[in-house]
């Protein structure tokens, strides 16, 4: 679908009726499978989109008379695989979107074509970027709450494993981190405006958007640090639990060590005076109980258990 911008309104036009030599402004979007030939007919190089098709990299390139950018369309936040891509060709008076398995991007563009939905040519590309990350704020808040809940559960729990939950949160944050890193790289190139294709108004809007994306990126980095702290706290709890178990075994070993010595002493195959004593056996029993009691009292006083 192609549209001509006339008096702030969109008028659908056929590709053959687009005249880029005048002052009229246009934008259009096509499915990737049927769009490469159309891109070349408007003076855009088709190789850009071909090279970026199916990749997981976002980029921005300057060419003679136009700019090209390729953006990921993300789906599930617990998967690092992009759902699709949008390849964008930009001229001073024409923007062409090539949609590669990107139904979400198509919905955004269709909304622009609705009455009252068109933001103006200077804000068209900026609004498209805004809509791409519109749901990220809620996702970031949700992740932050999940981390806080996980931290509370970790502190209240006396057992159980939180390894899977921590790993899942780190993976979701990694997906967002990679996405915003590449998006910020694209924005840096876009703001350079080497071909002078963006108006001052567009540049102003993109600078605002760049600040917003940068703040979200820093929030994501802070959340990754938060998850790391929770993981370290969990590891500390596990270590404390292991130390307590080892302490119990150590105390038991220390208690029975004198008894082992006593058994070894009287187990020697030697003739001892105690063997003929009438109260020798009860005396050994009382001595063993006394040793165990003394050890427990001593360890309790030292707060070893």
Image (spheres, helix red, strand yellow):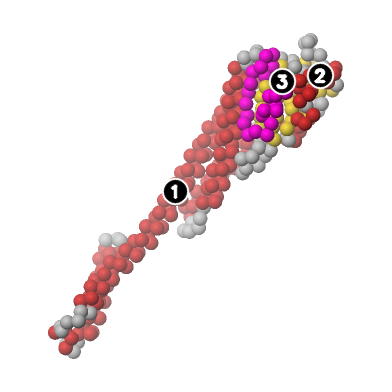
Q: Nearer the viewer, mark 2 or mark 1?
A: 2
The numbered mark, 3 or 1, whose residue comes first in the sequence reads 3
Q: Which of 2 and 226 is in front in this view?
A: 2
Q: Residue 217 at what x, y percent from top left?
A: 55, 32
Q: Residue 233 carries which label?
A: 1
Question: At 79% across and 29% down in the image, what residue appears?
Answer: 34
* CB within 8 Å, label 3 to label 1: no
Q: Residue 204 at what x, y percent from top left?
A: 63, 18
Q: Nearer the viewer, mark 3 or mark 1?
A: 3
Image quadrant in which the C terminus is located: bottom left
Judged from the image, the secondary structure of the residue bearing numbered disc 1 is: helix
Q: Which mark is residue 4?
A: 2
Q: Residue 27 at what x, y percent from top left?
A: 77, 21
Q: What is the spatial separation of the Cα atoms under label 3 and label 1, in whole angstroms? A: 53 Å
The numbered mark, 2 or 3, whose residue comes first in the sequence reads 2
Q: Which of 209 and 86 is in front in this view?
A: 86
Q: Residue 41 at what x, y percent from top left?
A: 79, 19
Question: Callout 2: few (<14), some (14-19), or many (20+) C-alpha neighbours within 10 Å?
Answer: many
- Residue that lies at the very extreme toward the top in this rendered image: 22
Position of residue 202 in the picture relative to residue 299 (left or right): right
Question: Callout 3: few (<14), some (14-19), or many (20+) C-alpha neighbours within 10 Å?
Answer: some
Judged from the image, the secondary structure of the residue bearing numbered disc 2 is: strand
Q: What is the spatial separation of the Cα atoms under label 2 and label 1, in whole angstroms? A: 59 Å
Any part of residue 304 in sight: yes
| Quadrant hosting residue 189 | top right
| Quadrant hosting residue 283 | bottom left
Q: Nearer the viewer, residue 228 or 271?
A: 271
Question: At 18% across and 89% down in the image, what residue appears?
Answer: 278
Please state the extent of the stretch shown in magenta in the rendering: 46-67
Identify the residue under disc 3: 45
Position of residue 142 in the picture relative to residue 289 (left or right): right
Question: Callout 1: few (<14), some (14-19), or many (20+) C-alpha neighbours within 10 Å?
Answer: some
């Amino acid at each position: 679908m192609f549209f001509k911008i006339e008096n702030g309104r969109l008028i659908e036009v056929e590709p053959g009726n687009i005249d880029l030599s005048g002052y009229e402004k246009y934008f259009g979007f096509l499915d990737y499978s049927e769009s490469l030939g159309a891109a070349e007919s408007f003076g855009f190089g088709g190789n850009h989109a071909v090279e970026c098709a199916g990749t997981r990299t976002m980029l921005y390139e300057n060419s003679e008379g136009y700019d090209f950018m390729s953006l990921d369309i993300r789906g599930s936040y617990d998967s690092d695989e992009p759902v699709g891509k949008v390849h964008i060709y930009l001229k001073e008076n024409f923007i062409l979107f090539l949609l590669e398995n990107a139904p979400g991007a198509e919905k955004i563009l269709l909304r622009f074509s609705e009455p009252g939905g068109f933001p103006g040519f200077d804000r068209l590309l900026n609004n498209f970027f805004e809509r791409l990350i519109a749901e990220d704020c809620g996702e970031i808040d949700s992740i932050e709450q999940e981390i806080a809940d996980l931290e509370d559960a970790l502190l209240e729990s006396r057992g159980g494993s939180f390894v899977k939950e921590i790993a899942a949160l780190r993976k979701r944050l990694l997906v967002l981190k990679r996405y915003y890193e590449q998006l910020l790289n694209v924005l840096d190139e876009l703001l350079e405006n080497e071909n002078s294709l963006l108006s001052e108004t567009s540049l102003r809007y993109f600078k605002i958007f760049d600040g917003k994306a940068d703040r979200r990126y820093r929030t994501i980095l802070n959340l990754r640090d938060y998850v790391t702290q929770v993981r370290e706290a969990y590891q500390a709890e596990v270590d404390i639990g292991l130390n307590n178990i080892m302490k119990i075994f150590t105390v038991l070993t220390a208690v029975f060590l004198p008894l082992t010595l006593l058994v070894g002493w009287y187990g020697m195959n030697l003739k001892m005076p105690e063997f003929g004593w009438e109260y020798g056996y009860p005396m050994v029993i009382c001595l063993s109980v006394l040793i165990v009691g003394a050890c427990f009292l001593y360890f309790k006083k030292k707060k070893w258990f």
